[in-house]
Image: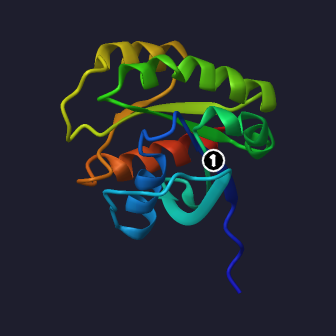
């Protein structure tokens, strides 16, 4: 019997409606649904990623972005090795909120690595990419731009997340 793959817990976080669930579905199922039901609490998927060091299993936790779920989310961050902070490039406020998301996560997990993800690049951008890049650089985090609708950048996002998790 082959040895069990290492399982790395990662979290996808950010405001409601930035496309977190759509990114996860696009990557794990190859599907995109234009209208989605809001995530209540948490949802999770697993998928194997092949890294240069070998395959790992990502346990991907999709946390609800609405403010009313904040107290519930804290417990779901525990044990995370890496977090994707996702914002919507058509909503500058969602980019501004990433600092608050990082603060919330850092209260629950002391040593976690991040990636910053600008989603919905297939639409007209209002959030400045250079601001997002500076935010990512300040945390030594990779910055990736994605479109869950077209699939652009989605594999790169999850590979970067897996690399961060494997290094932590």
* Label 1: how many Cα within 10 Å (few below 14, some 14–19, many 20+): many
Residue nearest the viewer, comparing 138 with 123 = 123
Image coordinates of residue 31 in percent, x first then y, are 34, 66
Q: Look at the image and tell me whether residue 96 can be seen.
A: yes
Image coordinates of residue 28 in percent, x first then y, are 45, 65
Relative to 116, say whether 147 is above or below.
below
**Number of numbered discs present?**
1
* Rendered residue at 57%/39% (across/down): 65
Relative to 105, say whether 7 is above or below.
below
Relative to 149, say whether 138 is above or below.
above
Image coordinates of residue 135 in percent, x first then y, are 46, 15
* Rendered residue at 79%/42% (across/down): 78
* Rendered residue at 57%/53% (across/down): 39
Question: For numbered disc 1, what is the local secondary structure?
Answer: strand
Residue 33, by quadrant, is: bottom left
Residue 134, by quadrant, is: top left
Residue nearest the viewer, comparing 158 with 74 = 74
Quarter of the figure that contains the N terminus? bottom right
Q: Look at the image and tell me whether residue 58 can be seen.
A: no
Coloring scheme of the render? rainbow
- Residue on which disc 1 sits: 10
Image coordinates of residue 91 in percent, x first then y, are 35, 26
Quarter of the figure that contains the C terminus? top right
Give left or right: position of 30 versus 109. Answer: left
* Rendered residue at 62%/39% (across/down): 82
């Amino acid at each position: 019997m082959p040895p069990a793959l290492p399982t790395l817990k990662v979290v996808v976080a950010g405001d409601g409606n930035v496309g977190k669930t759509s990114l996860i579905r696009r990557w794990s199922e190859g599907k995109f649904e234009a209208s989605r039901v809001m995530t209540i609490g948490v949802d999770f998927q697993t998928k194997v990623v092949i890294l240069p060091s070998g395959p790992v299993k990502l346990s991907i936790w999709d946390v609800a972005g609405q403010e009313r779920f904040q107290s519930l989310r804290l417990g779901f961050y525990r044990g995370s090795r890496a977090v994707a902070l996702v914002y919507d490039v058509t909503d500058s406020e969602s980019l501004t909120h990433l600092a608050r998301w990082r603060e919330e996560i850092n209260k629950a997990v002391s040593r976690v690595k991040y990636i910053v993800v600008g989603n919905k690049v297939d639409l007209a951008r209002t959030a400045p990419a250079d601001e997002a890049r500076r935010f990512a650089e300040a945390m030594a985090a990779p910055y990736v731009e994605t479109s869950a609708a077209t699939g652009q950048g989605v594999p790169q996002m999850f590979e970067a997340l897996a690399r961060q998790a494997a290094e932590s």
